[in-house]
Amino acid sequence: MADFLSDSWFDRLNRTLSQAGPVPVKPDVVFRIVIEMTDTPGGAPHALTLTIRDGEAKVDPGDNLLADTLIRMTYADARALFRGDIDSAGALREGRVKVRGNINALVPLLEWMQHAHPVAGEPETGTTD
């Protein structure tokens, strides 16, 4: 798998999201979720932004001041969440994930994002994790 938060990781995740089927958000809605990592190692982005627009989802490095929802967690928890080693509901219950903003708009996206995960978790030839 590509290194977490590397350019190739973002490319692979965006390819996966584009193949995950329709995003469960009305086509005329723009929704931004920022995932902020409190202790990202030097050189890696401190945040990533998931943008839902025109029925498509895209993840970019960095944050966005227009975020509807801000999710804050440690780098290790973010990495584990994206690898599928922990689930979002459990991490939220345990206080490992803090959410601020429009959590109700986030709920329909969780199942869709989890559906996309098995494809994202497949090994990619020639890269390491």
Image (cartoon, helix red, strand yellow):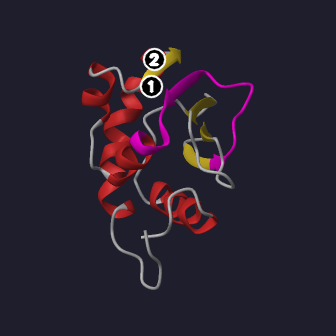
Q: Which residues are magenta?
A: 60-77
Q: Using the image as rendered, state which of residue 100 and residue 32 is in the foreground.
A: 100
Say what amino acid the circle numbered 2 marks.
Answer: Ile
42 to the left or right of 127 = right
Relative height, residue 16 to residue 60 (above, below) = below
SS for tag 1? helix
Residue holding disc 1 = 106
Q: Determine which quarter of the picture holds residue 5.
A: bottom right
43 to the left or right of 39 = right
Which residue: 72% across, 32% down? Answer: 64
Residue 73: x and y in percent read 47, 31
Is residue 126 within the magenta segment?
Answer: no
Picture quarter with the C terminus? bottom left
Q: CA distance from mark 2 to mark 1?
A: 5 Å
Label disc, if present, on residue 103 of the rendered structure: 2
Which residue: 75% across, 26% down? Answer: 65
Q: Residues within 10 Å of mark 2 (few under 14, many from 20)?
A: some
Residue 111: x and y in percent read 31, 37
